[in-house]
Image (spheres, rainbow, N blue to C red):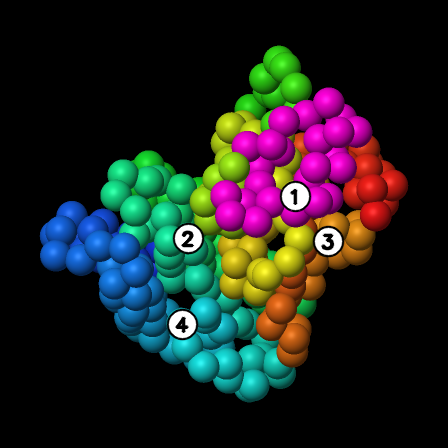
Amino acid sequence: MDDVAVAVLAARAAADVLLALRADGALSGRALGDAGDAAAQQAISAVLAAERPGDAVLSEEAADDPRRLTADRVWIVDPLDGTREYGEDGRTDWAVHVALWADGELASSAVALPGLGEVHVTDPPPALPARADGPVRIAVSRTRPPAEADAVAAALGGELVPMGSAGYKVLAVVRGEVDAYVHSGGMYQWDSAAPVAVARAAGLATSRIDGSPLAYNAAELSLPDLVVCRPELAGPILAAVRSGR
């Protein structure tokens, strides 16, 4: 089984338990989210232990193992990205992230959108849809849209589109639902690793909000900001961020 297949297997295993737990109806809200975090972590851990027992793992739902810093292969996972949205009945804007970092770069990755029944992978790479007519659409957090996104919208004549999880927002750019995702503040490596890998495979531009590269498997877990966008928008978006600061 190649690494993409392992990523898909792990992401689907987590998606299955998350959907079953939600459908059961015994829990809701925060309690459902907490149970989902734990169940998805267990599902992904079981797959990786069986298929790639020698690899290191960095997960939001497990203690950080410093041995990953000297490992050649590290799985960076978020078993349930968008816990709040998962706990809200009927919402689909949550995700499961499974990324492989190998030899210094993001490699084979999968992002499941269980609410939509989709899994997006790095190979074969996603086909980027043509941009829809109309203003530039910019995905932002439902609860804390950044000032930088306001500056971008003003400069580009765009509109802000609130959405749930980070993974869903990145995949919304991949799927053509929006044209860009601009975020600053309160994010970690597992929040973006897998979706950024898929976005890069699709030919999208990805960077920190200051234009510097997104680096993974670093000692510092925080990776608080990012821009993911159609390649032709990268220059104008970064320029708007700089002028708005």
Q: Residue furthest right?
A: 243
Residue under the point 40% across and 72% down: 61
Q: Earlier in the sequence, mark 1 or mark 3?
A: 1
Q: Which residues are magenta?
A: 138-161
Give the class, few, some or many, for how many residues have Cα within 10 Å of label 2's Cα (few <14, many ≥20).
Answer: many
Q: Earlier in the sequence, mark 4 or mark 3?
A: 4
| Residue 40 shows up from this direction | no
Tag 4 residue = 61
Tag 3 residue = 208
Front one among 60 and 158:
158
Q: Nearer the viewer, mark 2 or mark 3?
A: 2
Residue 142 falls inside the magenta stretch = yes
Going by the numbered disc 4, the residue's amino acid type is Glu
Going by the numbered disc 1, the residue's amino acid type is Val
- Residue 55 horizontal/vertical position (percent): 47, 76
- Residue 47 horizontal/vertical position (percent): 31, 67
Q: Nearer the viewer, mark 4 or mark 2?
A: 2
Tag 2 residue = 82
Tag 1 residue = 182
- Residue 68 horizontal/vertical position (percent): 56, 80
CB atoms at circles 4 and 3 under 8 Å apart?
Answer: no
Residue under the point 59% across and 17% down: 132
Give the class, few, some or many, for how many residues have Cα within 10 Å of label 3's Cα (few <14, many ≥20).
Answer: some
Q: Marks 1 and 3, Cα distance to the nearest angstrom?
A: 9 Å
- Disc 2 secondary structure class: loop
